[in-house]
């Protein structure tokens, strides 16, 4: 079952365990922060066992990964140890898996959590069949949607884009110094954009979110509705899945995100299923005050080679560039950062 957030997945398993079932949660270590609260204050306190299949990005023994994985990658095991959560590395063999699961079974009988750690690539993506069934047939791709959106925006619009392919598509089709490409922190793109909008009230601010990101921390919609930044446009590029990490289903197909946003106090909330809908919706944002919410239903087509943001900018360069775009001189300007890139 796809859960909006790793923490909710752990809590779902806790509920199932209360009814006598055994539960497993598969997650990336970037989601470990989301599970620590329910793990420590619910499952461990109540002695509810759980098996975590934890895929480790930024593993210290592997070639350098994306910067957002560095700190969590280096500290995943230490965090688990600190919390007394037993864990074991999967060695890639069937017998190794049997041994690890036997260890998991042992912790289960002691009503404790157990984490089985996988290296990058060891947990396979969903099968092609499953993905075919789940293919989204909307006419507009993420890249095309971004182009249509930008056609309706003033050139000085500040843009905050969510992690994964959406930032990479933005880099490909509309790389500008006013773009802040988020990497990591899934679910927090609209909060960052709202923070910028509230503190830069004379500028239009666009949050380019995904359905996975929007669902992960949906409570922020209520905060945005309450704070009501008039200059914020929150766009969700909704491909009904977590396409950047293999295309697993999200739950957006059965959720009306625009109805949620409207109920949370956004001034306008629109759903677009075709190119012309996107153009009309963005034009409306220009002459009415926000906050605006625009769901664009998109397909899953991306170019086969999609450059990573970090192939052009280090995080520090991107931050400095964006601050210059706002009109602030970041104090790190003209420095060489750890990646050796001069800003
Ligand atoms: C807290 C957290 N959980 C999981 C991930 C791994 N992750 C990176 S991008 C992504 C998919 C995001 O889906 P969506 O926002 O719908 O954008 P799409 O990739 O479909 O364009 C996931 C799960 C992460 N970075 N952070």
Image: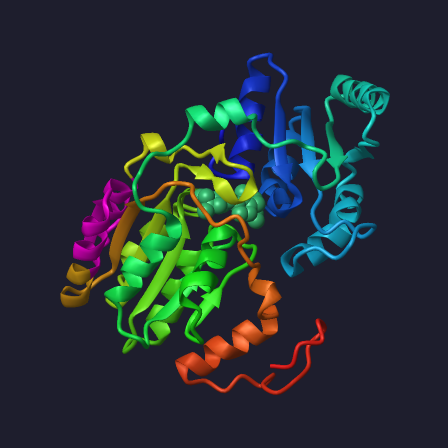
Is 50 situated above or below 292? Answer: above
Residue 9 rendering spot, x and y as whole percentages: 54, 31
Residue at image point 84% right, 32% down: 91
Q: Nearer the viewer, residue 222 or 43?
A: 222
Residue at image point 41% right, 62% down: 173
Q: Nearer the viewer, residue 280 or 225?
A: 280
The image's colouring method is rainbow
Q: Nearer the viewer, residue 304 or 258?
A: 304
Residue 136 rendering spot, x and y as whole percentages: 37, 34
Residue at image point 66% right, 57% down: 66
Q: Nearer the viewer, residue 338 or 222?
A: 338
Q: Is residue 233 visible?
A: no
Q: Is residue 282 visible?
A: yes
Is 293 situated above or below 273? Answer: below
Residue found farthest to the front: 304
Span highlighted in magenta in the image:
257-282
Q: How many marks?
A: 0
Residue found farthest to the top: 20
Residue at image point 53% right, 78% down: 320
* Magenta stretch: includes residue 278: yes
Residue 300 rendering spot, x and y as whole percentages: 42, 41
Rendering quarter of residue 83:
top right
Left or right relative to 251: residue 89: right
Left or right relative to 48: residue 227: left
Residue 207 rendering spot, x and y as whole percentages: 37, 60
* Magenta stretch: includes residue 297: no
Left or right relative to 10: residue 91: right
The quadrant of the image that shows the C terminus is bottom right
């Amino acid at each position: 079952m796809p859960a909006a957030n790793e923490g909710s997945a752990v809590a779902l398993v806790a509920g199932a365990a209360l009814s006598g079932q055994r539960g497993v949660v598969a997650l990336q270590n970037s989601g470990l922060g989301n599970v620590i609260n329910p793990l420590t204050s619910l499952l461990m306190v109540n002695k509810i066992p759980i098996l975590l299949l934890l895929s480790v990005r930024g593993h210290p023994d592997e070639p350098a990964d994306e910067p957002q994985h560095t700190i969590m990658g280096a500290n995943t095991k230490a965090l688990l140890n600190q919390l007394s959560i037993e864990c074991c590395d999967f060695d890639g063999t069937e017998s190794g898996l049997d041994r690890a699961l036997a260890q998991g079974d042992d912790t289960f009988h002691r009503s404790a959590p157990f984490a089985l750690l996988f290296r990058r690539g060891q947990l396979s993506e969903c099968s092609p069949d499953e993905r075919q069934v789940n293919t989204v047939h909307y006419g507009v791709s993420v890249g095309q949607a971004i182009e249509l959106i930008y056609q309706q925006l003033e050139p000085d619009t500040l843009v905050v884009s969510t992690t994964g392919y959406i930032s990479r598509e933005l880099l490909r089709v509309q790389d500008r110094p006013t773009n802040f490409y988020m990497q990591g922190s899934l679910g927090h793109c609209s909060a960052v954009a709202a923070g910028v909008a509230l503190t830069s009230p004379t500028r239009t601010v666009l949050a380019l979110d995904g359905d996975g990101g929007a669902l992960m921390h949906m409570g922020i919609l209520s905060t945005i509705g309450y704070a009501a930044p008039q200059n914020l446009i929150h766009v969700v590029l909704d491909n009904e899945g977590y396409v950047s990490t293999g295309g697993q289903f999200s739950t957006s197909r059965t959720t009306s995100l625009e109805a949620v946003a409207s109920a949370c106090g956004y001034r306008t909330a629109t759903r677009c299923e075709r190119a012309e809908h996107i153009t009309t919706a963005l034009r409306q944002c220009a002459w009415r005050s926000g906050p605006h919410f625009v769901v664009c239903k998109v397909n899953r087509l991306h170019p086969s080679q999609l450059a990573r943001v970090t192939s052009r900018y280090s995080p520090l360069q991107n931050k400095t560039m964006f601050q210059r775009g706002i009109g602030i001189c970041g104090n790190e300007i003209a420095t060489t950062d750890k990646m050796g890139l001069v800003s």
